[in-house]
Amino acid sequence: MPSHLQDAVTLNNGVKMPWLGLGVYQAKEGDEVEQAVQAAIRHGYRSIDTAAAYHNEEGVGRAVRQAIKDNGLSREDVFITTKVWNSEQGYESTLAAFEKSMDRLNLDYVDLYLIHWPVKGKYKETWRALERIYQEGKAKAIGVSNFQIHHLEDLLKDSEIVPAVNQVELHPELTQKDLLEYCGSKGIRLEAWSPLGQGNLLNHEALKEIADKHGKSVAQVILRWDLQNGVITIPKSVNKERIAENGNVFDFELDAQDMEVIDRLNRNRRFGSDPDNFNF
Ligand code: A2P
């Protein structure tokens, strides 16, 4: 169990990835994303999750370089994830998209490169490109996002490298238990996007009760539940206080009953798109 914000889980290729990171989906390019990333690193975060589709890779890269300087860190101390967008999928186009992301980030390598969505008829070719990027050392680990079990089974049939991570929507109303078990059996680490249900779960009565019992916030309870389930988590915030709050989940423990109550809130409810039915 991680006991510190900088604790990391060892992925299936030996690379260490922090258990908790900052998500920057919908953080605006420029000052907003840069302030958020710098605040997070100042508060002790060591992992930042962006994507080509977020249109803020330049700001993320700039803020990471600045934060490294300001906090006496080196590049190896920070874990950067980005993702290839759907319209760029395919072998050659993914290789080109990766180079464009690297230019925008202005970094020598990324720590984790993900296929953002399982685009039908494309994701296997995209994966071959990621395998090459990995073999060339430009990404320290590669993985997928929004893959269901059947997508993973299909991919594993034809791939050389098992994805290190599958990043999916996961929160108390979408607990993803089958996927969690399946990924565990294949050595694929599950990672939660929108762990707070895009902020929609923060007034949930059952969660409030547990939060009050521990003297923590609902957001902190949810993030702690992720970690105790062995799930990497990347809450999004652009607010310094909430960034600090979300990172402060290593000083309490949910008991077995709390975990069970939260697990039972599952309604298979998505706030984001359905990986089996999306049109972008
Ligand atoms: P903000 O960026 O203004 O903090 P998710 O990660 O599930 O997508 O949730 C992100 C949403 O939840 C954002 O709207 C974010 O707003 C808000 N949020 C993040 N952390 C907290 C928190 N600790 N308390 C309340 N709202 C939060």
Image (cartoon, grey):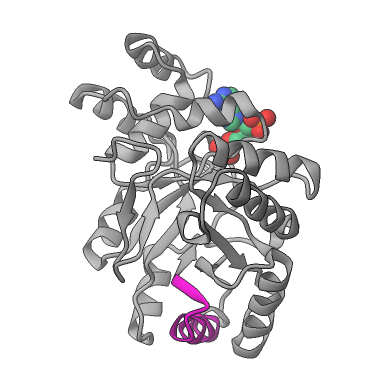
Image quadrant occupied by the C terminus: bottom right
From the top left corner, tell me how far across and down residue 17 is, in percent: 39, 56
The answer to whether residue 115 is left or right of residue 185 is right
Look at 59% across and 47% down and name the residue there. Answer: 272
Look at 43% across and 27% down and name the residue there. Answer: 248
Can residue 130 be found in the magenta stretch? yes
Look at 66% across and 29% down and name the residue there. Answer: 239
From the top left corner, tell me how far across and down residue 29 is, in percent: 78, 50
Q: Which of 235 and 78 is in front in this view?
A: 78
Q: In this view, does 20 lie above or below 123?
A: above
From the top left corner, tell me how far across and down residue 160 is, in percent: 35, 86
Can residue 137 be found in the magenta stretch? yes
From the top left corner, tell me how far across and down residue 131 is, in percent: 46, 83
- Choose top left, top right, bottom left or bottom right for residue 226: top left
For this orientation, the residue located farthest to the bottom is 92
Image quadrant occupied by the N terminus: top left
Magenta residues span 124-141
- Choose top left, top right, bottom left or bottom right for residue 58: bottom right
Number of on-image labels: 0
User: From where the camera sits, is residue 114 visible?
Assistant: yes
Q: In this view, does 209 lie above or below 21?
A: above
Magenta: main secondary structure equals helix
The answer to whether residue 29 is left or right of residue 69 is right
Q: Nearer the viewer, residue 208 or 119?
A: 208
